Image: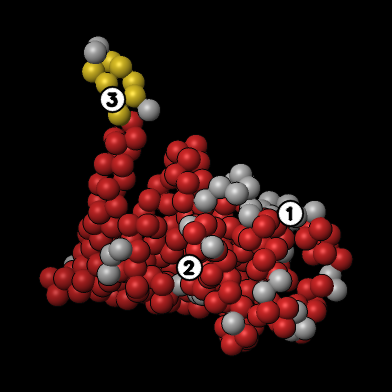
Amino acid sequence: MDIGINNYHLDLSAFETNLLKILFYSIPAMILIWRGMRGWHLGLHGKVAALVSIALSLAAAYFLGNQAGYFIPDGIVEDPLIEGLLGNALAGIVAYVCLRLLFTAVLKISSGKNASSFEKTGGMLLGVCEGLLLVFALALVVRWYAEVSEASVLADSTEGVSPEEMLEQETPNLNFISRATLYWNQKVQKDPAGAIIEKIDPVPSDFYDLSKNLMILSRNPKVLERFGQSPEVVEFLDDPTLQNLKSDPKIVKLYKERDFLQLLREKPVQDALKDKEFRQRLEDAGVHEALTRSVAEVRDPKEGD
């Protein structure tokens, strides 16, 4: 998109790309500086309290996320993945705020008037460590948002159109946050930090791959039909997890209506795709390999010749 201003044409797409490149590096740097300066101000004991609060809040998010999810009103989000993450975030934030208030009150009572340089330097170093944790937490949020945005684009794609072409066409039509997260997610995957983010992500990486591959096939009926008739898939239809899904009337209804995006959003389906044993059975039965071949055929029709 170009805008003419006094005979000067501003290429907004190039401008946005350069802006996102700058923010990709500047936002983590600003977080580290901010938390380091805050650590210098609070001192060693204050930052120890902050890190303990973060650690306990992460534990609360992990273990109490499901319970906290019941406090989220129905209908706010449709995607069970996002709903589960909101429950984790709610539990973590509430625990963090309560713990920080408690530690602040205790330190306020027991603190002296002047902090030594050792106290301030230790606080600054711990503040930088805290900043690193926040950067990785932000990277996880970017990863989740980007994966959901990409799945939504693929779900609304025209039947028979290659996923790469569809993403290239529709990404500029997304809102700025979605475009930014998609760009940053692709960029961080090429960065050494991408491997670390993938390891700390509580959502398995092959869950993302399975979801997107199934979405790609759903927009290519002919390839999907051939995939469904492959020997690996036919033999796997007796799997107990699939039998349980087939007994759910809502899932059967969504499948018949070809509403695959909503089908993948259903909690039983997402639970199945997240189940490590189920994914291992998919791998052992050769279904995953058959799925990869079918997706390769969609990306390059010559693969199916």
Location of residue 270 (image quadrant): bottom right
Which residue does the image show at 43% across and 57% down from the upper left? 142
Using the image, determine if residue 87 lies above or below residue 235. Answer: above
Q: How far apart are the two marked residues, 2 and 3, measured between alpha carbons?
A: 45 Å
189 vs 68, left or right, is left
Q: Which residue is mark 3?
A: 10
- Which of the two labelled residues, at mark 2 and mark 3, occupies the earlier sequence position? 3
**Residue type for callout 3:** Leu
In terms of secondary structure, where does tag 3 sit? strand
Work out how far the residue at label 2 is from the one at label 1, CA to CA, in angstroms. 39 Å
Q: Residue furthest top?
A: 6
Q: Earlier in the sequence, mark 2 or mark 1?
A: 2
* Residue 285 appears anywhere in the view: yes
* Dots 2, 3 in contact, CB < 8 A: no
**Real-space CA distance between mark 1 and mark 3, rounded to the nearest whole angstrom:** 41 Å
- In the image, residue 275 lies at what x, y percent? 62, 80
